[in-house]
Image (tube, helix red, strand yellow):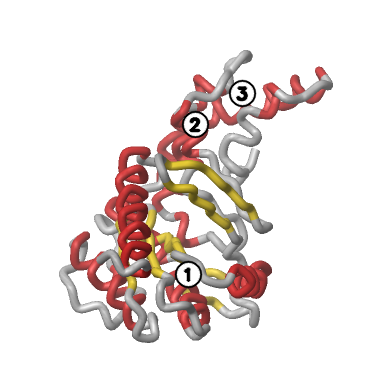
Amino acid sequence: MSLSDEGGVLLGRYREQADSTEQVECLQKLQAARDLWAYERVMFVECFDRQNEFQNENRMYTNARYFMDEIDRISEEGYLPIVADIINARRVTQEVLNYQYQDKDMEIEIIDVGGGIGERQQMIEVFLMQGNLHGIIYIVAVDEYDVYTLNEAGEQQNRIRESLQLFGQIMTHPWHIRTAFLIFLNKQDIFQRKLETTNIVDHFPEFQGFQNDVNDGRTFFRSLFRDSANGRDTYFHDTQATDENNIQTVFRAIRSHILTQRLIELGLM
């Protein structure tokens, strides 16, 4: 089993399989992963710590560590996912997804557009088709300051610099004045852990803060995106998507911002 498999898909797969042979094979793979984790845990932990060295060919997703830590529980026959399993599962957005829900007296619609290279043009087209959006949430995996990937030209490119470039392209469009740009600097827990062993300045020579300082790192990356905002107001949130309380706090702040903007439009503020 590849540790880069989407978290939770393989681990819960046997619950959905109608064919008993496939169930047995899946359970065998899970048992093999369980045995490896039991006897080679130190080696795997080192792989997680050094994953930025081999992410191009065999990228190891950050949720893999969680599922391997829980391998004893989730490899048992009859396994049912708990809330933490669902939160830590990863699903890559490859199409436009539309979510609508009621939050107290406000009806909220969220449009989720994939941010991969193949979806980027589609992302901008969807934004333009929607017209006057109240807000655009741009999510940045801030822990990827030391991660590189191959761009369309086949060249190595830093993941955050790539994200900055895309953000700059989005900001060149003539957005409505009421559209708020909300930047989520996500994966703060992994970002903080990485800073203990990896220095930002090794990948961003312009960084002038203290090494291994979380606050200096956050301030630096905020400044990079603020500089790319083409003069538009941007609102930053430090997020950890696997922390339910953190995300609830962030969305309460977003809801308050949207309400305030609406009151201003109506001339009530």
> Crowding near pointer 2: few (<14 within 10 Å), some, many (20+)?
many
Question: Against 196, is 118 above or below?
Answer: below
Front tag of 3 and 2: 2
Q: Which mark is residue 159?
A: 1
- Point out the tag, 3 or 2, that comes first from the N-terminus: 3
Name the residue type under label 1: Arg
Front tag of 2 and 1: 2
How far is mark 2 from mark 1, CA to CA? Answer: 26 Å
Q: Which mark is residue 183?
A: none
- Say which residue label 3 marks: 31
262 vs 180, nearest the viewer: 262
**Residue at the image point whose x is 68% and y is 69% from the top:** 118
22 vs 177, nearest the viewer: 177
**Residue at the image point whose x is 57% and y is 57% from the top:** 111
Determine the image quadrant of residue 16. top right
The image position of residue 85, as x and y in percent, is 49, 31
